[in-house]
Image (spheres, rainbow, N blue to C red):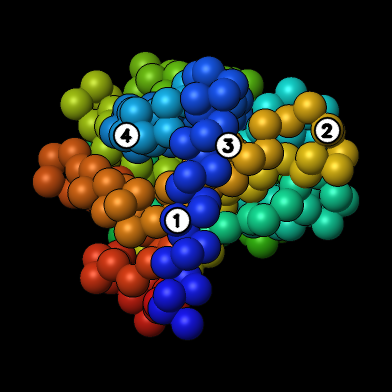
Amino acid sequence: MKKSIIVILTMYILTFSILSVALGRQRIKMATTTSTDNSGLLDVLIPPFEKKFDVKIDVIAAGTGKALKLGENGDVDIVFVHARAAEEKFVKNGYGVNRRDVMYNDFIIIGPKNDSAGVKGMKDAAMALKKIAGKQAPFISRGDESGTHQKEKSLWEVAKITPKGDWYLETGQGMGATLQIADEKQAYTITDRGTYLSYKGKIDLPILVEGDERLFNPYGIIAVNPAKHAHVNYIYAMAFIGWVTSVQGQKIIAEHKLFGKALFYPTAVPIKIRITNYELRITN
């Protein structure tokens, strides 16, 4: 069995080596979320892969909704996103194949230090939003069908509230820009922890609500289906998926930190680093 595995791996590596020489440097396009881009993760995760396989990855950072749409249209080879229900629909409808879990972090609700809505320390994120709406305290939403926006909408649904009014503003922009607008207006917003940590020195909005299981934020990576779009670079897309879910790739994710804190936690291989709130929920 071990000899068979070694032979298969050897053939796999030789195949990519031959392709690289024969075809020259390859390019693949990846649509991903603004959180993976803004957090700086891609700056450390992609270069080793590019060097190893002599391939260039062109990154298009957008909300999850837009990223999946690019995949549906065959405009990219890979999508790397964080909205599980939307990802499963993408695969079910035949646009993507070989989805893999990669990592997770969590969402948090942040806001002004004076916390006019009085949500600090709450463990129920939906009820925290209900209090914010009740006080009509300024709230900034991405409003872009990103994974973060979809999470926010699901929480409003649990709270049985349709947010509207002057207190509720949709930016239609990425997480970084939305954080900056929330800071300028001293408003509440929902963000993933990774992007928050990457902007911690630029904004003055503390974490007010965290730890609710509903705020769990898993990321998945999917190859665009070559049966749907024959032109996609499926071979190298799968090579990158293999890279981010390998021991080496997962180690890079685990070691990417800011202010001494991990921004993402790998899930594809056993890594002994976990967010305490989810320790019992996520196991390898």
Residue located at (30% from left, 52% from top):
248
- Asked if disc 1 and disc 3 are in contact, CB closer than 8 Å, the reply is no
Quadrant of the image occupied by residue 45 = top left
**x then y, percent, for residue 28:** 58, 26
Say which residue label 1 marks.
Answer: 10
In three-dimensional space, the C-alpha distance between marks 2 and 3, rounded to whole angstroms, equals: 14 Å
State the CA–CA distance, disc 3 to disc 4. Answer: 14 Å
- Answer whether residue 243 is visible to the viewer in this image: yes
Instruction: Answer with mark 2 or mark 4, whichever residue precedes in sequence.
Output: 4
Question: Is label 2 in contact with label 3 (beta carbons under 8 Å)?
Answer: no
Residue 48's disc is 4
Which residue is tagged 2?
230
Decide: is 246 above or below 116: below
Q: CA distance from mark 4 to mark 1?
A: 20 Å
Q: Position of residue 16 (x, y in %)?
A: 52, 39
Q: SS at mark 2?
A: loop
Q: Which sits in the foreground, 50 or 46?
A: 50
